[in-house]
Image (tube, helix red, strand yellow):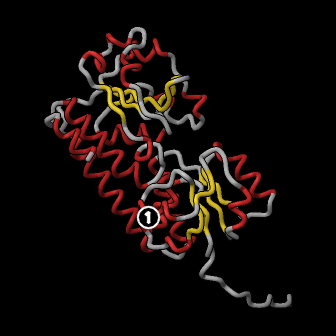
């Protein structure tokens, strides 16, 4: 008979000291009521506003490794290939790192489920996910009664010109639009979603939604591109900025404020709501 293994202690409190290097994990932990576990955040953390009181130890592509390790974290949360080198450097320094890589609405919900289990809040996580699903379903139901579904170009960056990542394109469809580059939605890397300006004009978007991460959108520059003055979006004045903090963050912000703002814009363009609804969505 093999010798029985000794019983091992179970530490239900792990992880106790978490550093979140992207905004969405910070927001999720606050929504789960586990903000006391957070000991450091990204410099871009702003949801909820209280998160800005936490020590800020990174940008999105760069991190202060000494400041992070001084916080003695037992878990560091990073995101995607953009933070792959940050993740690598932290691992080389002996840290425990979990790199999430959610790219679609479904994967965002899976990420929330996993993080909630990690902090012992599985039921609260399920409730949060159901609340988010319910909100998305309500928006999708509203969009189904639109007289038509406007063609949408989502501009994730201006130079080079980059179309929207998958969760953004998912949300455009939920909100009532049709993305004009559906074939690129599953390309996880931004360099694989670079599009030609002339091709955007040829596909004639009825709505242009722009969100330049970390930079104010220049609407005049968009409208003055060669050939774009003839697009339906520019001719009819349907060029809008969506704040990057509520749409380029693959977490609750995009699934609530981001999609609601897109829905209000698309409802107006489709003729389902008055134009004042756009401003109401931004408030």
Q: Going 42% across and 43% down the picture, which residue do you hit?
A: 247
Foreground residue, 176 or 232? 232
Q: Specify the farthest residue to the left.
A: 274
Q: Going 54% across and 49% down the picture, which residue do you hit?
A: 102
Across and down, in percent, residue 76 comes to 65, 62
> Is the residue 11 above or below the residue 231 in the image?
below
| Residue 231, picture quadrant | top left
Foreground residue, 5 or 192? 192
Q: Going 45% across and 67% down the picture, which residue do you hit?
A: 30
Report helix, strand or loop for mark 1: helix
Work out which quarter of the rendered image holds the N terminus and state it.
Answer: bottom right
Across and down, in percent, residue 48 comes to 41, 60
Q: Which residue is mark 1?
A: 50
> Is the residue 209 above or below the residue 224 in the image?
below
| Residue 235, picture quadrant | top left
Foreground residue, 176 or 55? 55
Q: Going 38% across and 16% down the picture, which residue do you hit?
A: 203
| Residue 40, picture quadrant | bottom right
In this rendering, would 238 be left or right of 90? left
In this rendering, would 89 be left or right of 281? right
In this rendering, would 49 be left or right of 39? left
Q: How many residues crowd mark 1 within 10 Å: few (<14), some (14–19), many (20+)? A: few
Across and down, in percent, residue 137 comes to 29, 52
Number of numbered tags placed on the structure image: 1
């Amino acid at each position: 008979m093999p010798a029985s293994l000794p019983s091992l202690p179970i530490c239900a409190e792990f992880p106790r000291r978490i550093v979140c290097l992207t905004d969405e994990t910070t927001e999720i932990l606050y929504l789960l009521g586990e903000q006391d576990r957070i000991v450091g955040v990204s410099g871009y953390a702003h949801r909820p506003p209280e998160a800005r009181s936490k020590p800020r130890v990174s940008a999105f592509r760069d991190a202060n490794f000494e400041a992070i390790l001084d916080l003695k974290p037992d878990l560091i949360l990073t995101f995607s290939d953009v933070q792959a080198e940050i993740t690598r450097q932290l691992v080389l320094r002996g840290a425990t790192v979990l790199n999430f890589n959610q790219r679609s609405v479904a994967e965002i919900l899976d990420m929330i489920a996993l993080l909630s289990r990690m902090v012992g809040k599985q039921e609260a996580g399920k409730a949060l996910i159901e609340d988010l699903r319910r909100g998305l379903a309500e928006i999708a139901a509203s969009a189904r009664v639109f007289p038509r579904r406007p063609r949408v170009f989502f501009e994730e960056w201006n130079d080079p010109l980059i179309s929207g990542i998958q969760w953004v394109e998912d949300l455009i469809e939920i909100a009532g639009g049709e993305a004009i580059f559906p074939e690129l939605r599953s390309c996880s890397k931004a360099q694989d979603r670079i599009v030609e300006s002339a091709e955007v004009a040829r596909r004639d978007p009825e709505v242009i939604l722009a969100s330049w991460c970390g930079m104010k959108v220049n609407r005049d520059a968009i409208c003055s591109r060669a050939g774009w003055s003839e697009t339906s979006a520019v001719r009819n004045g349907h060029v809008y900025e969506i704040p990057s903090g509520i749409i380029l963050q693959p977490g609750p912000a995009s699934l609530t404020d981001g999609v609601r703002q897109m829905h209000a814009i698309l409802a107006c363009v489709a003729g389902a709501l008055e134009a004042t609804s756009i401003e109401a969505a931004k408030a």
